[in-house]
Image (spheres, rainbow, N blue to C red):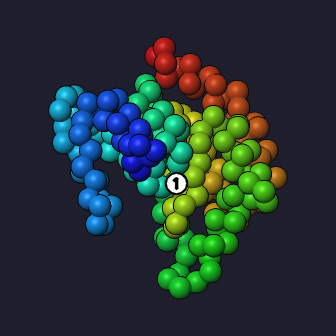
Amino acid sequence: MIGKEGQTKKKIETLGEVRLLVDSVDGNVSVDQRGDALKAALSLSAVQAIARGFNPEIAKTLFDDYMQLIVVSLREFAKPGSRRIEELKGRIIGRDGKTRKVIEDLTSTRISVYGDTVSIIGDYVSIQYSREAIGMIIAGKKHRSVYQYLEKRVKEIKFRKIEETFG
């Protein structure tokens, strides 16, 4: 979280107008708000994104307009102690990361599969389609069906983004 010579921490503190307090024992992070409450909340989202496996540069995009983070727990789709979570992670990532890459490319989102979660960074519209595609994979749909679904939605995604931006 802190980064080389504390650069990541400093950048988030600057962007969010906050002071990040990192507990060296358990790794918990708290935020001392110094400015805008929204920026402080975005700082927490950036910290959470890094904790969920995103590169700090990608996490910093959460400070851009319309960007957000969602975290989906895979635990609700698997029985405790089963291998189902590992299977789901494998299906979402795909061979050599292909599935994740296709979803990212077609929806203009970034996806991290880490621990028992799948996290998505993107604008509101793109996240909805990315989440839907991941839901289809979790439900057992064939990868080809998911790709076709997204390919059909590319124009719709672009149109909805324009609509969101300009009202």
Q: Residue at x 44, y 55 (%)?
A: 51
Q: Residue at x 66, y 29 (%)?
A: 156
**Which residue is disc 1 drawn over?**
53
Give coordinates of residue 92: x percent, y percent: 67, 59
Compared with 154, 71 (above or below) is below
> Left or right of 11: which side holds 31?
left
Q: Residue at x 69, y 50 (%)?
A: 100
Say whether residue 69 is visible: no
Give coordinates of residue 14: x percent, y percent: 32, 30
- Going by the numbered disc 1, the residue's amino acid type is Gly
> Left or right of 147: which side holds 92?
left
Compared with 133, 67 (above or below) is above
Assign a secondary structure to mark 1: loop
Binning the other alpha carbons within 10 Å of mark 1 as few (below 14), some (14 to 19) or many (20 upward) gives some
Q: Residue furthest front?
A: 5
Quadrant of the image occupied by residue 104:
top right
Compared with 17, 46 (above or below) is below
Between 89 and 33, the residue placed more toward the observer is 33
Give coordinates of residue 118: x percent, y percent: 54, 57
Between 44 and 91, the residue placed more toward the observer is 44
Say whether residue 28 is visible: yes
Q: Residue at x 70, y 27 (%)?
A: 155
Q: Residue furthest bottom?
A: 81
